[in-house]
Amino acid sequence: MLDQEAAGALRRAFSLFPTGVVAMCAEDEDGPVGIAVNSFSSVSLDPPLVSVCVARQSTTWPRLDRLPRIGLSILAADQERLSRQLSSRNGDRFAGVSLARGEGSALFIDGATLWLDCSIHARLEGGDHLIILFEVHKTTVFPNVAPLVFHQSQYLGLSRAS
Ligand SMILES: Cc1cc2nc3c(=O)[nH]c(=O)nc-3n(C[C@H](O)[C@H](O)[C@H](O)COP(=O)(O)O)c2cc1C
């Protein structure tokens, strides 16, 4: 097992890979439920699959895990505050958030760059995380919306490479 120093160094090393930020949201009998994740990856075109890695200690994932449909919203450059809100451990993660309903239980974030209406295809072992493979049932694209970028624990936007 890694000691704290080695774990911190590895976390910083992994953070050099720039990612987008995804809101993974749905609605159950108690209302909206969701978390911000950056471990999203596209996986397969046929069948259409994407993956997200969820920490085994997540208290939110068990609520999402039993729902038939989960919405993935790729956040926009102006949604940093929303990403912080959807990852906070206290407070209402959905206060003031403008949501759109998908099929069944899926919820989407208005103003995002992409919506993926998903169901769970498989749950795979991933060390201290679970690798969730999602089947994508519907995509709604907003190609003119600039994405939020997460790099070295900072929120950034895209700019053209020189
Ligand atoms: C930019 C960003 C990316 C994150 N990515 C992930 C992720 O990929 N997987 C994960 O389990 N948690 C991720 N988190 C942490 C969750 O958003 C959340 O804080 C964590 O799951 C604890 O809340 P919970 O107990 O309600 O699940 C991320 C947080 C931030 C701010």
Image: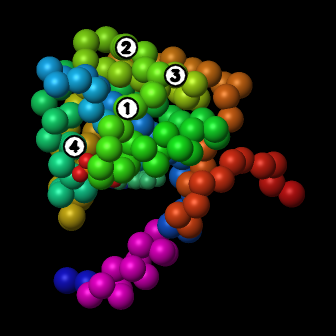
N-terminal label among 3 and 2? 2
Alpha carbon distance from label 1 to label 2: 14 Å
In the image, is residue 139 above or below residue 18? above
Alpha carbon distance from label 4 to label 2: 19 Å
Name which residue type carries label 3: Asp
Q: Main secondary structure of the magenta part?
A: helix
- Please tell me whether mark 4 sits on a helix, a strand or a loop: loop
Q: Quadrant of residue 107?
A: top left
N-terminal label among 1 and 2? 1
Identify which residue, 25 or 32, lies in the foreground.
Answer: 32
| Mark 1 in CB contact with mark 2 (< 8 angstroms) | no
Alpha carbon distance from label 3 to label 4: 21 Å
N-terminal label among 1 and 4? 4
| Mark 3 in CB contact with mark 1 (< 8 angstroms) | no
Name the residue located 18 percent from the left edge and 49 percent from the top edge: 59
Q: Which residue is mark 1?
A: 94
Alpha carbon distance from label 3 to label 2: 10 Å
Name which residue type carries label 1: Phe
Verify whether residue 54 appears in magenta. no
**In the image, residue 40 lies at what x, y percent?**
42, 45
Q: Which residue is mark 4?
A: 60
Name which residue type carries label 4: Thr
Q: Is the residue marked by circle 3 packed among few (<14), some (14-19), or many (20+) residues within 10 Å?
A: some
N-terminal label among 4 and 2? 4
Q: From the viewer's perspective, is 45 left or right of 63? A: right
- Residue 101 is tagged as 2
